[in-house]
Image: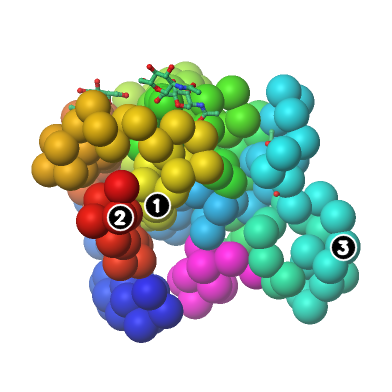
Amino acid sequence: MAISCIKLCLVLLFFLASFTIPLDCFPDIHPKTTVALVVFGDSLFDPGNNDSIKTTTEFQANFPPYGESFFKYPTGRFCDGRVIPDFIAEYAKLNLIPPYLETHNHQLANGINFASGGAGALAETNTGLVIDLKMQLRNFKKVEKQLRMNLGKRGAQRVVSNAVYLFSIGSNDYLSPLTNNSSIFKLYSPQDYVAMVVGNITATFKEIYKKGGRKFGTLNLGPFRLFAET
Ligand SMILES: *[C@@H]1O[C@H](CO)[C@@H](O)[C@H](O)[C@H]1NC(C)=O
Ligand SMILES: *[C@@H]1O[C@H](CO)[C@@H](O)[C@H](O)[C@H]1NC(C)=O
Ligand SMILES: *[C@@H]1O[C@H](CO)[C@@H](O)[C@H](O)[C@H]1NC(C)=O
Ligand SMILES: *[C@@H]1O[C@H](CO)[C@@H](O)[C@H](O)[C@H]1NC(C)=O
């Protein structure tokens, strides 16, 4: 997993490095706008959205020692310091990407992070405790709409198509049946269950593509052997 994270970061960096856009194509709008980083996912990417979910406190990182090695206080990140998108933002010379639920005007600017600890691609995964991928997509659409109101169609389109969409999702779909109700693995063959998870992730990519998104990056999942043991 760590190795693939590093690989992904390198690929993304290469990607980000090539983002110098010929500005004279868009002489009228915000010539200094940099690329935005738009983040979806689970606890590996959550910068504190989870802290704002009021239904439960089951999956929160709002107590020490979370955050101690960098922020010096718990930020809601499931980490003693920064999470992967924070490092990618730093390398891309962006500010820290704020959690959607703490962003008052919901603008894109440098980017926005919708990730939620415990979330999966399936609505059934940790229902009620997390912002699942579909809801994250819905939140993105709200931001995109706001962007069109602020910048106009063309300006918004430019931000959306230049943005990098980064994902870490799926692990919890395979893990949560173990703690919740593993009989789901008797209802679906391994192939069908994986197809359902991947199908929902693919559907999300397509929705973002339809809005104009073109640059996607995703973390690998760790290896699983769940089905062999149930
Ligand atoms: C969000 O994540 C934190 C850290 O584990 C957890 O304490 C909190 O309960 C989670 N939020 C929700 C609504 O579960
Ligand atoms: C538990 O599993 C059931 C059946 O798949 C699902 O409907 C429910 O939302 C799950 N609950 C949680 C908390 O994951
Ligand atoms: C687990 O899920 C199965 C099928 O979704 C359901 O029939 C069963 O009642 C659930 N068990 C529990 C304890 O929730
Ligand atoms: C997405 O997941 C749901 C279960 O939450 C499933 O019924 C549906 O078929 C999946 N969609 C795709 C495109 O695989």
Is residue 100 found left or right of 141 in the rendered image?
Answer: right
In the image, residue 7 sits, relative to residue 12, either above or below, namely below
Q: From the viewer's perspective, is 141 left or right of 154?
A: right
Q: What stretch is highlighted in magenta?
A: 82-92
The answer to the question of whether label 3 and label 2 lie on touching residues, with beta carbons closer than 8 A, is no
Q: Mark 2 points at which residue?
A: 229
Residue 158 at least partly seen: no
Whether residue 56 sits left or right of residue 178 in the image: it is: right
Identity of the residue drawn at 38% across and 42% down:
173
Q: Percent x, y for residue 87?
A: 54, 72
Instruction: Identify the image's colour scheme: rainbow, by chain, secondary structure or one colour.
Output: rainbow
CB atoms of marks 1 and 3 within 8 Å = no
Q: Position of residue 41 (x, y in %)?
A: 45, 47
Q: How far apart are marks 1 and 3 (CA)?
A: 25 Å
As drawn, the label of residue 64 is 3
- Nearer to us: label 3 or label 2: 2
Of helix, strand and loop, which one carries label 2?
Answer: helix
The residue that label 1 is drawn on is 171
Element marked by disc 3 = loop
Q: Which of 83 and 38 is in front in this view?
A: 83
Q: Distance between the residues labelled 1 and 2?
A: 17 Å
Q: What residue type is labelled 1?
A: Ser
Q: Which amino acid does label 3 sit on?
A: Pro
Q: Earlier in the sequence, mark 1 or mark 2?
A: 1
- Corner quadrant of residue 192: top left
Question: What is the secondary structure assignment of the residue under circle 1?
Answer: helix
Q: Does the magenta stretch include residue 34?
A: no
Residue 36, image x, y percentages: 44, 52
Figure quarter occupied by ligand 3: top left
